[in-house]
Structure formats: structure tokens, C-alpha cells
Image (cartoon, rainbow, N blue to C red):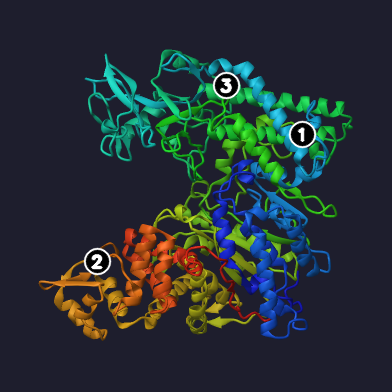
Amino acid sequence: MSTTQAPVKRKLIEVALPLEAINRESAREKSIRHGHPSTLHLWWARRPLAACRAVLFAQLVDDPSAHPDRFPTEELQAKERRRLFDLIERLVKWENSNDETLLREAREEIAKCFDGKPPTILDPFAGGGSIPLEAQRLGLEAHASDLNPVAVLINKALIEIPPKFAGRPPVFPGAAESRMGEWPRATGLAEDVRRYGEWIRDEAEKRIGYMYPKAKLPDGSEANVIAWIWARTVTCPNPACGIRMPLVRSWWLGKKKGKEAYVVPKVVDGRVEFSIGHDPAHAPTKDNDGTVTRNGAVCVACKTAVPLSYVRAEGKAKRMGAQLMAIVAEGDRRRVYLPPNSEHEAAADVPIPAEVPDTELPEAALGFRVQGYGITRHADLFTPRQLTALNTFCDIVKEAREKVLADALAAGMPEGDRLEAGGADAAAYADAVSVYLAFLVSRLADLGNRLCGWEPVAECPRHLFGRQAIPMTWDFAEGSPLGESSGSVAVLIDGAIRAIESRPFAPPAARPGRVTCADAARRPYDSMLVSTDPPYYDNVGYADLADFFYVWLRRCLARVLPSVLGTMLTPKEAELVADPFRRGDKAAATRYFEKGFVRVFDLIRRGGVPTTPITIFYAFKQTEKSHEGAASTGWEALLEGLIHSGWEVTGTWPMRTENASRLRGQDSNALASSVVLACRPRPEDAPPSTRRAFLAALKGELPSRLKELQQASIAPVDLAQAAIGPGMAIFSRYAKVVEPDGSKMTVRTALTLINEALDEVLAEQEGDFDTDTRFCVRWFQQFGWDEQPYGRADELSRATNTSVDGLVRGGIFWSRAGKARLLEPSELSENWDPAGDDRISVWEVVLRLAKALDEKGVDEAARLMATAGRRVDLDAAKELAYLLYSICEKKNWSRTGLLFNNLGTSWTDVSAATRTGGALTPPSAQTQLDFGTDEE
């Protein structure tokens, strides 16, 4: 594709977005499960559907400024932009996901920007399928590819299979007569997944039901078992003891008030026995809860401290065992916790089946911690009973495929070609249903392995992949796949059919989705528009993690989709992840990652759609410090790839895609926001620049762009990362930036300069503050909340044109007996009335808002903000919240920093609540700043 083309129309994503509406719905989506693709199959770091839908729409729809003939004035452009914002705000709501009237309106807006022929959308790193699914929802031809076979199967199940069999009735005998009328969309397919899934469950009950005995309750009745709780064991190294010592993270079983339950260990005749305790007065405390910490273990009998090195050695020597600690049974609207017994221990003592996934785990990989304890093969991740159950389900899935085929033929469907050959009749339908049934087995493995912990608050087993890692666990919960509770096949069937039934369908005229297994660095991109969510440097080791699912999916589907599942494990060598274990060291991993990105985005630039920008989701936080200053390795690698392959950043947007409760602290590498980049090919005649000119452009343009990010209520913890986007928009517009010595400026140097410019902008915002606030900021920077001699306070107060007595009267400072300090938020007086405060300051407003939000929630903070806003500049208050977080981050004051981070993140919600006394109203749209492209 030539980069010396005529000026093209700017798209909405390059100018403006209703960012807060998108952010709010994206964060909300994290708590939605019914009908969400995540209930079909797990994938790591899946982007929210709302964000993908909004980005795709704004990527394709023209901004009003691109049509000066229709919208000649800024006023008319703003009015038209508001109409498009209203459409986006309705479009991103979960409840409107399948509103055909609304979707038709969105499709028409897109179509008229391309004379009725919008481009094909391609995600070459399709992963969990959010982007291609939303492209299909918007009526676009959606293509997806991924190197990972598990991701390919997920995408086939989302965008390729359901449209192929839309509108058909189920073939399970008698199922079609279960409802009157037609079977719209994928309801017939979903019904067959339900019926054949239940058939699989019933068949498994016949074959392995004996392994899952019922529990005998104290009243003599029987109940289904929800889970068996096991503790790993090793022999105590103390020669005078030598018991089989349990390794337990926590003794707690249930923490609901009035229903407390915990395990009580007792040593009897050289053996540990377990009973169940319920008295809160004798419950485990922080000091005696469990036997294993990060530092080592302790023997419950002799109290010998046991280092983890000994535990690892025992594991590698295959001398680590397991002992049943408790049985969890179904009760009358509550869990019943029972002590172990010989019958249930014997039921789990089954031989390991002959056919197990005997493939090896990587010696070392991102997110893996278990190999050091002797868990070196995929089969080691499961108990013998779990292996037997999963093997049995795999066998029955293969039998179900033949049953579906026979039933489809009996229903009058011609046999036709297989699914892999493009068939759409009985053989292909049997293959398609098998894919969803195999997902049941794959998801059962996630909930049925010996690394699943027990959750004492929710009182259910956790699944393995609470995060993108396979960590070591000590006590573990073994659920019953044949029951009706969490982790059972029955629950998994319900989640699968909801996901199938709720997925969108493009209009009949649209071409079906297409999914291929392909390397993004080698596939074609001819005439396809890319929107993608590429791998995040070294955050997720997708291939090694996906092998956990792949070994079971392959056993179910190897003959159904041989071209996708032809290898023993997922492809590793070409995976675009900076894995130092695979590449030898960190430097080599970074070079591999950057080289791969250059190759991929060079191919996209050469193919692609010349009239429309590509979009890239990126969420990464890894800050390193060197002699040059702070830099971000993940961003550096991505941006090197983009810039070296000839792209220019034309828009950046922070998408808040995580709930506030997911923020994991300041040292975490997980962002609460994704930064979405809009990029176009950089013109071949782009001018060079100098370091001095680049710095001048940063100083001139970054302050207003920073205000945009703050107005978007990006979390303060993410501000430094999000500010990289506007800074790189300046850097990437030049062919190169030349250093004083004539060398070419590196991306790392540019990132360091952007971070320095950000610090300067935040510092310059002090000019918006009153004198009391300027004093408090400078004191906080130097001393935090610490007490200092009065003389220091007096000297600083004179320098900032205020007084210590005035600060004390203002209720924000303390001074007595020659000592002085700032008052912490928790020390501020109660019942504060901003209207009656005769010495109000921006500092006091921010601290009181942070305190109110933390202690009493949005409504109380909104009440204070509404009144304080009549006395102080709330924009300055918001700037102060960001500045204070920045100070806390540099000082490593995590607790105080979290207080200001929460305030900055919630600012728009609090502000919106002030308008209606607590009822949230839709926020105003944010406008993307002009990046100075040559298109105007």
C-alpha cells in the first residue's frame, strides 16, 4: 500500500469519543456472566465487548469534520458528533447487545461511510474473540486468526459455527417438538448442546458414578458432595517425629457469619486426624491459620520449621502425597462440612488410566511455579480420580459426535462434507456440536484439577486460572463433576448454551465469519482492516498456558479438526511473546518481540485499507529505571515495532476495562486501563526533527492532552502509561528525531523524555492552587504526614505567602509544643460544611472528598462536591488528586496513594452524582486532541 496517497477522511476515533460511557460499561461488563463469551471458554486478558464495539464503530465512522460540505461550522460538527455519541452510548450497554433496531442504525452509519461496502475486519491476534465477535455484531465481515489452536477453536465457536447453522431446529430426538414455532438464530444449536451435554453427563454417571459417593449427614440422611478438601503432605524431617505432615494454606472452610466452619487438626498415634470446628471463639487467627507461608512450613505435631526447599525436594522425589481433610455436602440452603472417612478416601483411590496427557510442562515459563515441586507433566496436575473422569468424558464426547450424526441423518439432513471442509450438513453439524461438548471437558479441567483452592467466603472451589498463571497450591478442593454445584458439568452446560443463544448475528446479506490458524507474521492482509489486541510483551505466556486445555481438546477433537489440532502441543517457536525462558535471556526476548512486531505491522501496512486507520488495544505497565530515567519496556517494544514498520499514531484513548476492585496495588504490572491506539501509515515525506524541537512540541502540546486524560478520569495509577500515547503521537509524526550528536533518538529515550515532561506538567499545575494548598503540597512532598520542628513549617509558610496559624485555623494542619505536621484524612473533623468554612482550600476539599469516598461512598462524596464546587475550582481539585498520587507513587506510599487513586478514578462518577443528588447521569463526551496530521 502506498503511503503517498491523497488526504483521507478523519475517522471519529481520531477526533472524539464518549469515553466515560464506554469506560463505565466496559468495567461493568466484568461482573456479567450470563450469556458472556467467557462462559463458553476461558481465555486470558479478553477485552470487554463494549470497548471493542465502540472502537470498531468509531474506527469506521467518519468524523463530521471530514465533511465540511455538510458541516461547515464547528457548531454543526459538534451537533453531529453529539448524535454519534448518543448512538455509541446506547450501543455499549450490555442490555442493548442484541437490539436489532439499534444495531441496524449502527450498521447503516458505517455503511454510508463506505458507499455501502465497508471493509472486512481482521484480528490477527484473535485470542478470546471479542473483536471479531463485535465486528460481526456490527454487520461486518469478520475474519480472525491466531497461532494458538485453542484460540482458533474459541473463535470458530463464536463467529464461524453459529451463523452456519442459524435457524435450524435441534436434531436430538424429541427436542424439536419441545417448543412451538421456529428456532431463530442459534437456539436450535444451543438446544442440541444442552440435550447432548445432558446425555454425556448421564452416560458418565453410569460409568464413573461409583467414584463419587454421597455423604452421610449427622441425621442419617444422604446428600450430594460438593467437594472433597485435600491437604498435600510430606514426611516431617524431624527424626523424632516423622509424621505425615499436612501442608495447608488455611484451615477455614466457611466464613459466613453464624455459619463459620474450619478444619481442626489433631495428632493421634503418629497420624494427623481432622475434625470440623464451628465455634468462632476457637477459630483460626492470622497467627495460626494453616501450616505454610511464603517462608516455609511448620509441622503440626512437633512444630519443627520446615523450609520450602525440603518440600520441593520431597515433591521432586515423588514423595509428596495428599490426605483428605474435609467433605463439603449439600445441606438445606447451606453447606454441610463433615470430617473425612475411609469410604470417601477409598473412593478416590483409583488407578491412573492408561491414556493420560503424558506431555511435559515447560521446564520454565511465564506464570509457571509448579515444576519445582515435582509437577512436570500435564497428567501431574490432576488426581487419579480426576484423570479417570476427564478421560471418560473425552470418550463420551467422541461417542456423542456419532450420535449427533445419526440423529441428524434420521431428521432428514444430508450427510455432506465435514466441518473442516466447509460443510454445512449432518457431518459438519455433528462436528460443530462436538466442539461445544469438548469445551465442557476443557472447562471441567479448569475446575477439576489438584491446584483448585477452596473459597471460604463463596464456599465453592476456585478454578485454576484466576489469573494467567499456574501457581502452586497446598490444600485443594476436588469438586464433583456429576453434581449440580459449581464445577459440575450441569453448571457448565448452562453457561455454554447461554453464550451460544446470546451471540449476535449479522444481517443475512453479510458473509459468514472466517477463522484460521495462522502466524500473524506470515499471513496475508490484502484489503482487510485490522483491529487487534496483540500480546502484551511478557505478561501472558499464552501457548504454555493453553496447553492445559489443548491436551483435552485434542483428545476430543483430533479427528474433527485435524488441521487445527495436528500437533501434540500448541505451537511455541513463532509465538510473539517476550519469553526469556524460551529465548535465552531478557535481552534476546525483547529483540525477538520487537522484530516480530516490525514484521507483523509492516505486512499490515503493505496490505490493509488505505482510507481507514487501524486500531490496537494495549494494556501494559512495567516501569524500569536506568541512567536515562524511567521507561516502560512493554510500551517500548510495541512502539519500536510500530514506528520502525512505518506507522504514525493519530489517536490515543485510555479505556478503563477493569473494575476498581481489580486494582492490585501500585507495584502491579496490571493496568486498570487499556490504551487504544489509532494509527495510519506515516507519510513517506514526513519531515525529520531535532531533540530540541521534539521537546518544544512536548512542552507545547502535552499539558492540554494531559487535561484530556484527567477529564476522562483515567486512574491516576495509569496516568503515566496513558500519557505515553500523546507523547508518542508527537514522536511518531517525524521520520526521525535527531540527537545533538547526529544519532537517531531511540524510543526508550523518547519515553524517558515523555515521563519527564509529564512530571513537569503535573508540577506546573500547582499554579492553579491557592496558597494554603501550595504549602501543603510542598510539605507533603518533603515530609508526608511526619511531624517536624515548628521552624520548618514557619519558614515554608512564609515562602508560600501563608501562615502556620492560618493553616491550623483552616483545619488542615497541627502545631503544638514546637512541633508541626499535616493532618491525615482520618484526622479531619466530622460534619464538615464547605459552605460555612471560612478558610476553605483545594487541599482540604481533596482530602475530605477522598475520605468521604473511602468511608461512606459515592453519595456522600457527591454531596460534599456539590457544595464545595461553589467555593473552589473543582478542576484544580482534580488536578491535585493526580499530583498527590504521583507524589505517593514516587515515595512508595501505597496506602495513601490508593486513597488518591480511587478519588481520581471515581471523579466523573462522583461529579455525575452531584447533578441528581446521587443518581448517576450520562457523562459528557471527551474530545481527542488534534494530533496535527497533514490531512487538514
- In-front residue for pair 361/895: 895
- Residue that badge 3 annotates: 388
Q: What number is the disc on residue 144?
A: none
Residue at left offset 74%, top offset 76%: 8
Q: Quadrant of residue 433?
A: top right
Residues marked 2 and 3 touching at CB (< 8 Å): no
Is 637 rendered above or below residue 363?
below
Mark 2 surroundings: few (<14), some (14-19) or many (≥20) residues within 10 A: some
Is 710 rendered above or below residue 768?
above
Question: Picture coordinates of residue 439 (x, y %)?
Answer: 65, 35
Mark toward the start of the polypeptide (1 vs 2):
1
Q: Quadrant of residue 1?
A: bottom right
Residue at left offset 52%, top offset 35%: 361
- Residue that badge 1 annotates: 431
Mark toward the start of the polypeptide (1 vs 3):
3
Question: Picture coordinates of residue 483 (x, y %)?
Answer: 56, 25
Q: Which amino acid type is marked by label 2?
A: Trp
Which mark's residue is nearer the viewer, 1 or 2? 2
Distance (Cα) linking label 1 and label 2:
66 Å
- Residue that badge 2 annotates: 785
Mark 3 surroundings: few (<14), some (14-19) or many (≥20) residues within 10 A: many
In the picture, measured across the screen, residue 198 lies left or right of residue 752, that is right
Residues marked 1 and 2 touching at CB (< 8 Å): no
Q: Which residue, as the protein is rendered here, is positioned at the far left?
A: 817
Question: Picture coordinates of residue 715 (x, y %)?
Answer: 46, 64
Mark toward the start of the polypeptide (2 vs 3):
3
- Callout 3: SS: helix
Residues marked 1 and 3 touching at CB (< 8 Å): no
- In-front residue for pair 3/105: 105
- Callout 1: SS: helix
Q: Which amino acid type is marked by label 1?
A: Asp
Q: Which amino acid type is marked by label 3?
A: Thr
